[in-house]
Image: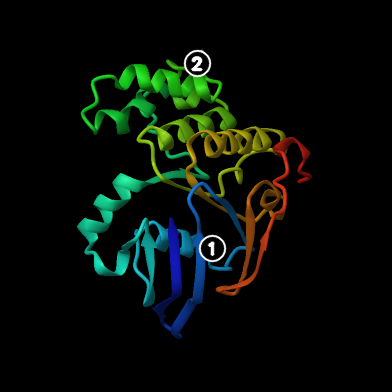
Amino acid sequence: MIRIDNLVKRVPTSEGELVILKGISLQIEAAETVAIVGASGSGKSTLLGLMAGLDTGSTGDVSLDGHSLAALDEEQRAMLRGQLVGFVFQSFQLLPSLTALENVMLPIELKNDSRARDKATALLGRVGLGERCHHYPNQLSGGEQQRVAIARAIAKRPQILLCDEPTGALDARTGRLVLGVLEQVNRETGTSTAIITHNAAIGAIGDAVVRMSSGEIVERVRNPSRMAVEHIEW
């Protein structure tokens, strides 16, 4: 579903050229969950942006469901991203003036779906927030806001779910709850999921963990049996 071939990202600085990514190659298969783990500055967030087509590499390529991003212009990449990709961010990115229900309805309404309210209500029920539909983001806890963000991300039924530090702003207990929702979504929908994180423990719940350092993949290890979220140690 996601194929990365010898991806390099360079940016100019006042001190010369900085190489952020150094020839990254990686595949994430359909329905696979991969945790991409690394310290701050390892290049993992830059990699996520390139995987989403929010930016382009200096050399190399990213393909989503067989579509080469290097062959597309910015408008075409945005269209493909809208069709295939859902996002979950550390900072939730909910619209503060909309209720939880309205936040989840938004991507469904943009597809001119007349059943947006019913579908959004069902999605909030799936993530355990059926009774919080009419609350605004500032009336929800951090974990509840993140679960609304997950419901919104899967509202358009993406084939690819990209998560940037989805538990970074949460305590350990709430983080486990959010990871449990992501795990449930992966099992039920077969969405290919990439989780960017600095927390090595999160790698235990995926099909594979990729470790990054200084712009390179230093290890890719498959998990012979995925660990249940409640069993991971933070």
Q: Are marks 2 and 1 in contact (CB under 8 Å)?
A: no
Give how far across and how far down residue 60 sits, in percent. Answer: 39, 76
Disc 2 packing (10 Å; few <14; some 14–19; many ≥20): some
Query: Mark 2: which amino acid?
Result: Gly
Give how far across and how far down residue 104 sits, in percent. Answer: 38, 28
Disc 1 packing (10 Å; few <14; some 14–19; many ≥20): many
Instruction: Identify the residue position indicated by label 2 in the image.
Output: 130
The reply to whether residue 149 is visible in this rendering is yes
Name which quarter of the figure residue 212 lies in.
Answer: bottom right
Query: Mark 1: which amino acid?
Result: Lys
Label 2 or label 1, whichever comes before in sequence order: 1
> Is 182 on the left or on the right of 56, as rendered?
right
> Is 210 on the left or on the right of 64, as rendered?
right
> Is 162 on the left or on the right of 38, as rendered?
left
Callout 2 secondary element: loop
Residue under the point 68% across and 36% down? 176
Residue under the point 24% across and 64% down? 72
The reply to whether residue 97 is visible in this rendering is no
Residue under the point 45% across and 31% down? 151
Give how far across and how far down residue 100 sits, in percent. Answer: 42, 23
Name which quarter of the figure residue 11 lies in.
Answer: bottom left
Residue extending farthest to the top is 131
Distance from label 2 to label 1 (Cα)?
34 Å
Instruction: Identify the residue position indicated by label 1 in the image.
Output: 44
Name the one closer to the observer, 6 or 135: 6
